[in-house]
Image: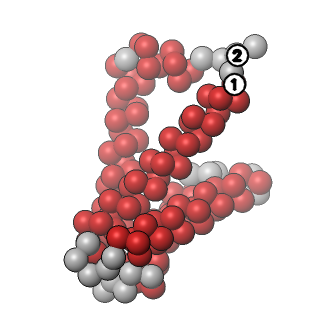
């Protein structure tokens, strides 16, 4: 049962990060590039940021630094893969940061207000 919960949480984390990156690119570049290019750029940024989080964990550094790596990659890949202007790339980066903060605040709010959610998130198995 533990392994199933692990894979569900891992899939939700990867999917959530991919979705925030994709929505940041979609809102800025939907008229200039194809859907395939946006999906590819979002996948690349998600993969690199997940690898950065893993490497930071191995190096005993805070994994929260991978969020900064992801934000930098959103800007960099927007410029390189989607041919965004500097201003568009910064807007994509800020949209990504805003969506991630909104998701984090929602999670925090649920942890403080919902006993059922808090119990589900903090349960341990022996």
Q: Seen in the image, is 91 located left or right of residue 11?
A: left
Mark nearer the N terminus (1 vs 2): 1
- Secondary structure at badge 1 equals helix
Q: Seen in the image, is 88 located left or right of residue 125?
A: left
Q: Quarter holding the N terminus?
A: top right
Q: Which mark is residue 30?
A: none
For mark 1, what is the residue? 2
Residue sitting at x 69%, y 55%:
54
Q: Quadrant of residue 39?
A: bottom left
Q: Seen in the image, is 76 located left or right of residue 22?
A: right
Q: Nearer the viewer, residue 123 or 44?
A: 44
Q: Quarter holding the C terminus?
A: top right
Local packing at callout 2 (Cα closer than 10 Å; few below 14, some 14-19, many 20+) is few
Q: Is residue 93 visible?
A: yes
Residue 59 screen position, x and y as percent: 76, 57
Residue sitting at x 53%, y 61%:
46
Q: Is residue 99 above or below residue 81?
A: above
Q: Nearer the viewer, residue 75 or 11?
A: 11
For mark 2, what is the residue? 125
Local packing at callout 1 (Cα closer than 10 Å; few below 14, some 14-19, many 20+) is few
- Secondary structure at badge 2 equals loop
Q: Quadrant of residue 32?
A: bottom left
Mark whose residue sits in front, 1 or 2: 1
Q: Quadrant of residue 125?
A: top right
Q: Cβ–Cβ below 8 Å for labels 1 and 2?
A: yes
Residue 63 screen position, x and y as percent: 62, 51
Residue 3 screen position, x and y as percent: 70, 30
Residue 20 screen position, x and y as percent: 38, 55
C-alpha span from label 1 to label 2: 7 Å
Total count of labels: 2
């Amino acid at each position: 049962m533990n392994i199933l919960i692990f894979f569900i949480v891992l899939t939700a984390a990867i999917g959530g990060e991919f979705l925030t990156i994709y929505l940041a690119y979609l809102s800025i570049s939907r008229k200039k590039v194809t859907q395939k290019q946006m999906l590819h750029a979002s996948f690349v940024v998600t993969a690199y940021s997940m690898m950065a989080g893993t490497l930071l964990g191995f190096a005993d550094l805070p994994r929260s630094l991978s969020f900064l790596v992801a934000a930098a990659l959103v800007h960099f890949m927007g410029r390189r893969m989607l041919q965004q202007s500097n201003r568009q790339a910064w807007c994509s980066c800020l949209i990504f940061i805003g969506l991630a903060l909104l998701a984090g605040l929602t999670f925090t709010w649920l942890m403080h207000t919902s006993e059922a959610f808090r119990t589900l998130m903090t349960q341990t198995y022996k």
